Structure formats: structure tokens, C-alpha cells
Amino acid sequence: MASRRQRIYGYWLQKGKFTITPEEAEVVRQIFTYYIEGMSFSSIARKLDQLNCPTCRTAAWSRYMVSNVIKNENYIGTPELPRIISLDAYTKAQVRIIQDAHKRAQARTTRDPHKKVPVPFTGLIRCGQCNAKYIRQYNGKIIWICGTMHRKGKAACHVKQISNDVLMEKAAEALGLRHFDERVFFEEIDHISIPEPCVLIFIFKDGHAITTGWQNKRGAIKHTVATRRAISKALQENYAMKRKANSS
Ligand SMILES: [Zn+2]
């Protein structure tokens, strides 16, 4: 019987059990090595084509296929899937993803001064679950999270974070603007309420409200707690090393 189950590169399903496909597993390891060494997703894709590495199903490798491999936590092993990549290699790759995103965000901020105005939302977003104000955080990009959740953890209040970019985009939409405008925002909006996950209510100073929704970006990586800890530790070590290098 043909399985409709999505194929996972590096494995094949035999009698209901995933087994490693050695040739593909080798490509997965190679992809991680290239990436950790500093190659981009596109250049890795080109390299794999030059080397005639087998793909999942299409004729050629694309940068999306490479990035899907890099962002697939399954390769460090799960109860179902045997391990192909060490946690160390996986962590190094995730650290690079975060640092690259950080660099891109900084470059954007320098290029486009409008991007560096996360301030207008400060104190104006309220959590509909616990009524606390949202606070600004940074995890490679600016995000806003419920203050209670930040101080006391997910058990105290568990609501979704929202990225600053999404917030600006949705605010512009609510205000009927093509691009976010801080001045118009302050003139018109009293506050923003997030009553439940993925719902935003803009409360205007004249009393009317606009309710809208948002979706978390497709393809965002959701890691297990253990992997998240490993990544965060590696990031901290990395920053500590940089600080040391800068101060000497
Ligand atoms: Zn809350």
C-alpha cells in the first residue's frame, strides 16, 4: 500500500519503521557541515547539484530544500527516527540561523529608519487573558510578549507572542495606511488588546475598534525544550566570547 505519509529526507519507511538511507543521511551531514562552515543555503544547493547528490523528489536542490534540512530537528533523533546529526552540530547551525537573522535585522534598521520604531507600542498592548501589558523582547527580531508570561512563566499566562513587524503591518492595515506611520498611530489609536491567540483589537481614541487576526509565520522552527536550551546556551557562550574579544 502506498503511503501518503510525507517522506522525510534521509529516511525510508519499511514495515512501519523508519530506517536511515545511508546515501541521503550522508548528504544531510554534508549540508550541516557546509552550513556551519559558513556557506549560504543557495551555495550549498549549487554545490549539492554539482556533486549530483540525490534530492527528495525534484530534479535539483533549492535553497528552500537546504533550509528545510537545516531547520529539521528530527535529524537529532526522535523516538521514531534514528539520529543522523549530533545535537552539537544541530545547535551550531541554529545559532548561525539566529545570528544571521540578527545581522539582517540590523542591516534593515540601518537601511530603513522606519523599521527602528518599535517604541510606539510600548505600554499600549494589553493581554486579554491577564490584563498585563506586553513587553518588548528580542530573539533575532523584535517580538512582544505578555508581561505576566515573561515574569512568571507560561503557567501564569500562556498567550502567543507577536512580532513587531506583524504588529506594524496590522496597525497600518487598521489605520488604512500602506505603511506604518507612527504619527498617525499615536493620533488615532488608544491601545491594542490581544484577547486570545492570534486576535488583535485596535481600540481607537474615538471609541471604535477594529478586530483583526494574524498568523505566526509559516515555517517557524518549533524546537523541543532540550534543543531550545542547547541553542540558548550556545548563543550565550558565543556572545560571551565576542564580548571578551571586544574588550581585550
Ligand atoms: Zn497575559
Image: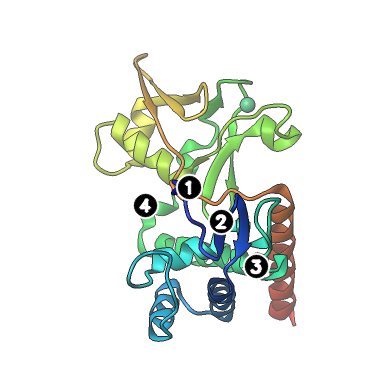
Ligand 1 within 8 Å of the CB at mark 4: no
- Of the residues under marks 1 and 4, which one precedes in the sequence? 1
State the separation of the CA atoms marked 3 and 1.
20 Å
Residue 41 in the image, given as x and y percentages of width and height: 44, 72
Say how many tags the image has: 4
Q: Secondary structure at mark 3?
A: loop
Q: Are marks 1 and 2 in contact (CB under 8 Å)?
A: yes
For residue 213, which quarter of the picture? top left
Q: Position of residue 108 (x, y in %)?
A: 40, 62
Question: Please, what is the three-letter code of the amino acid marked with disc 3?
Answer: Ile
In this rendering, which labeled residue sits more in front, label 1 or label 2? 2
Q: Earlier in the sequence, mark 3 or mark 1?
A: 1
The alpha-carbon separation of the residues under discs 1 and 4 comes to: 44 Å
Q: Look at the image and tell me whether residue 107 can be seen.
A: no
Left or right side of 15 for 45: left
SS for tag 1?
Answer: loop
Q: Amino acid at mark 2?
A: Leu
Judging by the rendered image, the residue that carries numbered circle 1 is 5
Other-residue count near label 4 (Cα within 10 Å), few / some / many at <14 / 14–19 / ≥20: some
Closer to the eye: label 1 or 4: 1
Query: How packed is label 3: few (under 14 Cα within 10 Å), some, or many (20 or more)?
Result: many
Instruction: Indicate the secondary structure of the residue bearing disc 2.
Output: strand
Which disc is residue 126 wearing? none
Q: Secondary structure at mark 4?
A: helix
Instruction: Say whether residue 190 is left or right of residue 178.
Output: right
Looking at the picture, tell me which residue is in the foreground, 147 or 13: 13
Q: Image height check: is 80 above or below 103?
A: above
Q: Is the residue 33 above or below the residue 207 in the image?
A: below
Disc assigned to residue 84: 3
Closer to the eye: label 3 or 1: 1
Residue 215 in which image quadrant: top left
The alpha-carbon separation of the residues under discs 2 and 3 comes to: 15 Å
